[in-house]
Amino acid sequence: MLDSLQDSLLQMSEFGLLSLLAVGGGLWLFKKNRPKDSSQLLDGMPVDRETVEVAIAKTQCVVNQLAQEAENSVEMRQVAYLQQEQVANLTIELDKQQILATVTGGKSVGKSTLIKVLEQNVETGYLSSLHFQETSPLFVETGEQSDANVFVEAKKSEIVLFLTNGDLTDTEFQGLQQLKGANQSTILVFNKQDQYLPDERVSVLQSLKQRGPASVVATAASPLPIKVRKHQEDGSIQEWLEVQTPDVQQLTQHLSELLAQQAQQLVWGTTMRKALLLKAEAKDLLNGIRRNRSVPIIEQYQWIAAATAFANPVPALDVLATAAINAQMVMDLGGIYQQKFSLEQAQAVAGTMGSLMVKLGLVELSSKAIGIVLKSNAVTFVAGGLVQGVSAAYLTRLAGLSLVEYFQQQEIATNSGTALNLDKLGQNLQRVFQQSQQIGFLQGFVKQGVKRLLPEVPEAVA
């Protein structure tokens, strides 16, 4: 497509050209199979004690690794020590007797009132082990992450009571899906049912059972008073408002049955979620440390590749791609992420990544984009091998950052350099390529390359 439209493309503005190239790269966008959040690994399956203990051990491993690699940061070491204490508490929590129930929902759905009523009805039997906490109202602010903290805290409890005053809105449904994905025991509570006519009440409850979780109950924590009218013998009429008793029987009965049958499993499930969450937090911090160590290495090899390709231009795209990915860089980055590669393995990885970039069209698109930027200045464009030199640096950076993202997705401390997952590696290559196609980044990167390869014209590219 780019070849056939070359003449017309050259007449377009620089912005239009680079935008079209970015769109062209988008034709190879990876499949939308986002990595599952660590809290989703339970996959709705029952959790036993042995499984949880294994998860705690893996979390301990990641936290210990963080403490070891954070030796140059006092703040990070303190975080690691705090996480080590949290891991130790997880083992203790496996045998806890108190059950935490989080009451959440939108604004004015009756969370506080329901808690007060329930606390008056849970003094005996299985319900005596229940302790309630209320979250701040959901769906008050806009944005995907507006309620993230609320859901994180909710997942640390054994039971979530999700309150609604009617049929589910889209935002409420998405919130329930988050809890379901985390294998969180959730009861959908249709509160204020007394404010509906009998037929409407049945219709709403049926809809909730179809769209909501397996457990749906109806309550009226603070029912509206009923107007009572009495006709007197003398013909007069006496009226008054009669206060109604809260109706939470369905909910308390369901809670009692749930605790009688699954109290221990609920505790284990909560401990499992906490372990996975803590592991994810520690892994993010550890990956941040490792990435900071990786970027200077990538930059070092990208300029080595640039100088080599500039001095010895190669005609073929596949040769350029292979030459740009240094096997030693693969070994150095693998060492940081404890993915140990032999020289032979690193050479194989380098060759594989080069072939992938050619196959996905990233080499050609990158070279064309860099060439367009360089054409804006005659002094730099006439320099032999400059396009390939800067392209080699760009491809090296692309490969290095893709490897970093790939390693970050692996388990911590696996200490293995086995064959790469080509599908995931290809997805990472395309993702990093898309992120690196912004016009501002390309112009800045080309300018850096020109300064290094042609120091006599440091301001050649505007």
Image (spheres, helix red, strand yellow):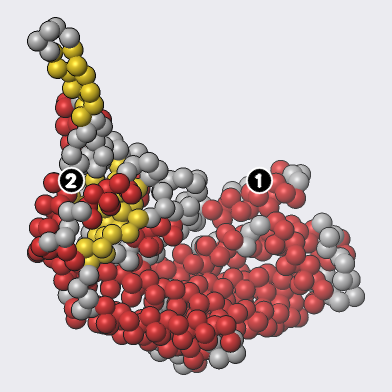
* Residue 4 horizontal/vertical position (percent): 63, 47
Q: Secondary structure at mark 1?
A: loop
* Residue 385 horizontal/vertical position (percent): 76, 72
Q: Is residue 257 left or right of residue 266?
A: left
Residue drawn 42% across and 53% down?
A: 136
Q: Is residue 237 left or right of residue 406?
A: left
Q: Nearer the viewer, residue 327 or 148?
A: 148
Residue drawn 40% across and 60% down?
A: 34
Residue furthest to the right: 456
Residue drawn 46% across and 86% down?
A: 81
Q: Are marks 1 and 2 in contact (CB under 8 Å)?
A: no
Q: Is residue 406 above or below residue 178?
A: below
Q: Is residue 249 in view from this perspective?
A: yes
Q: Which residue is mark 1?
A: 5
Q: Secondary structure at mark 2?
A: loop
Q: Is residue 275 left or right of residue 32?
A: left
* Residue 196 horizontal/vertical position (percent): 23, 28
The mark that comes first in sequence, 1 or 2, is 1
Q: Is residue 419 in view from this perspective?
A: no
Indicate which disc residue 248 carries: 2
Residue drawn 28% across and 73% down?
A: 271
Q: Is residue 339 above or below residue 192?
A: below
Q: Residues within 10 Å of mark 1 (few under 14, many from 20)?
A: few
Kindly identify the amino acid type of the residue bearing the numbered disc 2: Val
Tell me the quadrant of the picture where the C terminus can be found.
bottom right
